[in-house]
């Protein structure tokens, strides 16, 4: 992520006390990626790049390079890179996020040379291009309560992330064809899949996914399962 200094923000943004004052809530919940989190002088704050729910023609959205401020009191367990939903508000300093809630995530991978295709939405965007240069998002899926992200790495396997509630994730995965794809694997860690039979896990090589840490390079297969059994296993995997 770009540093605050590199973004041209002055030091006043480093002081959370500058963000006190009346807040005016703006509409419904929005979604975004927590791209930065800082601890300075015993104070913590971060920045969210909105991916849904914030009209970019809104005058308030032009401040701070389009990023949205979040105070440590408005978010629990902040993890940079995670997708969160939040209630946007406006105060004298610009846009902020309150009542932040992280979305759960399930990752799938497919061979790049697979002859079977997914049914993906037509529109691809990357509102986080300054931070996440190798990704695209599908805003249409946000209407289903899911953030769908595709990685653009030039690797033998293509990685997709679905962020949302467990049931919404599974509904979206089924809609775009993940469940019926003959070559799909769930990208997971051994600890997350500890209740799965060992023969259902495949160690994925560094050559296949060099950008993924080794501990998360395990592919879980469920090709022989019924739809009901696939949903049950995946719900258990993401804690639904």
Image: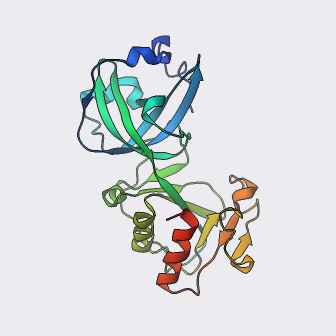
Q: Is 111 situated left or right of 122 in this image?
A: right
The image quadrant of residue 157 is bottom right
Point out residue 84 in the picture as x, y percentages from the top left corner: 44, 45
Q: Quadrant of the N terminus?
A: top right
Whether residue 2 is visible, yes or no, is: no
Point out residue 7 in the picture as x, y percentages from the top left corner: 50, 22
Number of marks in picture: 0
The image quadrant of residue 73 is top left
- Residue depicted at 63% across the width and 56% down the height: 154
Between residue 201 and residue 150, name the one nearer to us: 201
Point out residue 228 in the picture as x, y percentages from the top left corner: 47, 83
Q: Is 172 situated left or right of 109 in this image?
A: left
- Residue depicted at 40% across the width and 64% down the height: 168
Point out residue 134 in the picture as x, y percentages from the top left corner: 55, 48
Q: How is the image coloured?
A: rainbow
**47 in relation to 77, above or below:** above
- Residue depicted at 42% across the width and 33% down the height: 74
Q: Is 77 situated left or right of 65 in this image?
A: right
Whether residue 64 is visible, yes or no, is: yes
- Residue depicted at 49% across the width and 55% down the height: 104
**87 in relation to 227, above or below:** above
The image quadrant of residue 177 is bottom left
**139 in relation to 43, above or below:** below
């Amino acid at each position: 992520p770009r540093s605050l200094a590199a973004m041209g923000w002055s030091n006043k943004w480093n002081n959370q006390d500058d963000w006190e004052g009346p807040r005016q809530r703006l509409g419904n919940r929005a979604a975004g990626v927590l791209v930065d989190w800082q601890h300075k002088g015993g104070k913590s704050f971060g920045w969210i790049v909105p991916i849904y729910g914030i009209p970019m023609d809104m005058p308030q959205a032009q401040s701070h390079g389009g990023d949205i401020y979040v105070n440590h009191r408005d978010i629990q367990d902040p993890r940079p890179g995670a997708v969160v939903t939040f209630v946007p508000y406006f105060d004298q300093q610009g846009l902020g996020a309150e009542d932040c809630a992280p979305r759960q995530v399930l990752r799938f991978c497919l061979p790049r040379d697979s002859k079977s295709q997914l049914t993906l939405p037509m529109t691809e965007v990357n509102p986080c291009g300054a931070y996440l240069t190798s990704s695209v998002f599908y805003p249409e899926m946000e209407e289903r309560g899911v953030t769908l992200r595709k990685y653009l790495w030039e690797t033998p396997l293509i990685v997709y992330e679905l962020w949302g509630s467990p049931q919404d994730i599974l509904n979206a995965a089924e809609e775009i064809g993940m469940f019926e794809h003959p070559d799909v694997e769930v990208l997971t860690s051994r600890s997350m899949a500890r209740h799965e039979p060992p023969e259902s896990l495949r160690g994925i090589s560094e050559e296949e996914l060099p950008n993924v840490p080794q501990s998360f390079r395990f592919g879980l297969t469920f090709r022989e399962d019924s739809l009901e059994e696939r949903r049950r296993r995946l719900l258990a995997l993401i804690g639904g």
